[in-house]
Image (cartoon, rainbow, N blue to C red):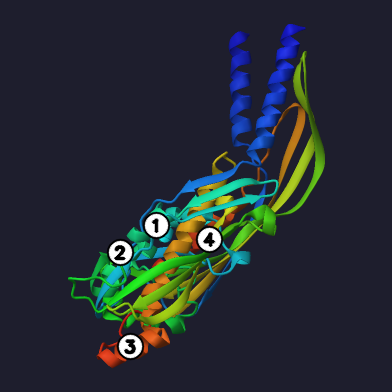
Amino acid sequence: MTFLRRGATAAALVWLATATGCVTTTVQEIRQATTGIKSNESVVVLGRHNNSADESEDDFINCVSSNLSGGSNKVGVISESAFVDAMFPWFEPRTAPLNTSDLPEIVNQPILADKLDSIGVRYVIWIEGNTHRTAQGGALTCSVSVAGAGCFGFLTWENDSSYEASIWDIKHGNAVGKVSSDANGTSYMPAVVVPIPFIARVQTGACNSMASQLKTFITKES
Amino acid sequence: MYRSHRRGIGACAAALCVLLAGCVGANVQMQGDIPTPLVNRLPLRIGLYFEPALVQYVFEEKIQDHGDWRVEVGQMQPKLFEKIAAAMFVESMQVDSITPTGTDLDAVLAPSIAEFQISIPSQTRSDFYEVWIKYTMKLYDIHGTLIAQWPLTAYGKANKGDFGFMDNSDKLAIKQATLTALRDAAAFLSLRFGTVPEVKTWMNARGSTVTSGAA
């Protein structure tokens, strides 16, 4: 009997740890040129830092980089900080090229072209967008007394992620396409003595979808 | 009764800590490294003069309901400008006055901080900690005559979402924003030095080619 009770408690804990809210993701792709990547070439994922309103979270940039460099069809990835430091001061928030028309100024300078060759970056992926809370509701009250503590109520909130990646081919100095990833999901937290969160991992969903699509986009020679 | 009383005090102390944590401000000692700028070297031998006010520069501000904010940015200035100058010029060295003797220099560069400002998310109702630094750059010939004087404005920001809700998130965020501003200063000095009109005129008169950065 004790064994069964322990088993049920363990199962409940595992369920609680893995319970998540639902996330809906949509990925779109626009191809402007052919792609392909050699084994000695790599990509770098950069956040746009010139516009505060659309600035992406570091977490998201790291998540996309990490997903690109792992799993099937993985590609070589240089971290944002390593690339920006190596190319300093050309990719700082106020000096980074905004359009591919600004690229020749960089790739045509021998000192910069040599550096790009040495670090082996073929594609620069610029990411814009972020995750924000679009709605929230409910109420939850917690109280502490001599007899103990507990919460009662119900909270719900909805998050929305919207990101767009622009892919530039540094070798040819042109834009090769765009991948956008939108996700939304609702999280819940009912509380009867103990609050139980059901978190919708909206940003992670958008990241996984975008990284997966980017891998296909870059590696598929079309 | 005694136990209940102790619990009450504990709860009050915890609440007080939470309240205080929201208004303590931050005390930042700037450290860190600026990468070497990837620019073409100018054929100039430049002395770097750091006035005491620059090296000892400390920004202090009391922000209502958000505590005292202090950023010690001065001690990082020599390291910053020495690194930039080493990449920008064929030769650079620190000098102890704007009229150095016993050296074979072409000019002396003397930076100073004219203004330093910060803003925190609760002031601007945005997600960003922001830092502005306004430098006054002066270039002297070796006799101490002013060749050029220009403002160098630097800006840096840090997203509060990247620093979580730890007690020291204010400190980490304002440190990151300041470091970004210092990088911005380094970027614009190394890329735009040769385009400052008076500097360009002086360099042309000397026969030095303006090939630095995006000139």
Pick the front one: A190 or B54: B54
Q: Which residue is mark 2?
A: B82
Question: Looking at numbered disc 1 in the image, what kind of residue is underneath it?
Answer: Val
Question: Looking at numbered disc 4 in the image, what kind of residue is underneath it?
Answer: Met
Question: Looking at numbered disc 3 in the image, what kind of residue is underneath it?
Answer: Trp
> Residue B60 location in percent, x, y?
56, 52
Q: Which residue is mark 3?
A: B202
Question: Which residue: 35% across, 79% down?
Answer: B213
Q: To which quarter of the image does residue B77 belong?
A: bottom left
Report, in whole angstroms, how far the alpha carbon at label 2 lies from the one at label 4. Answer: 42 Å
Disc 1 is placed on an element classified as helix
Disc 3 is placed on an element classified as helix
> Residue A179 location in percent, x, y?
53, 68
Q: Are marks 2 and 3 on the same chain?
A: yes
Single out the mark in the foreground, 3 or 4: 3
Query: Which sits earlier in the primary sequence, circle 3 or circle 1?
Result: 1
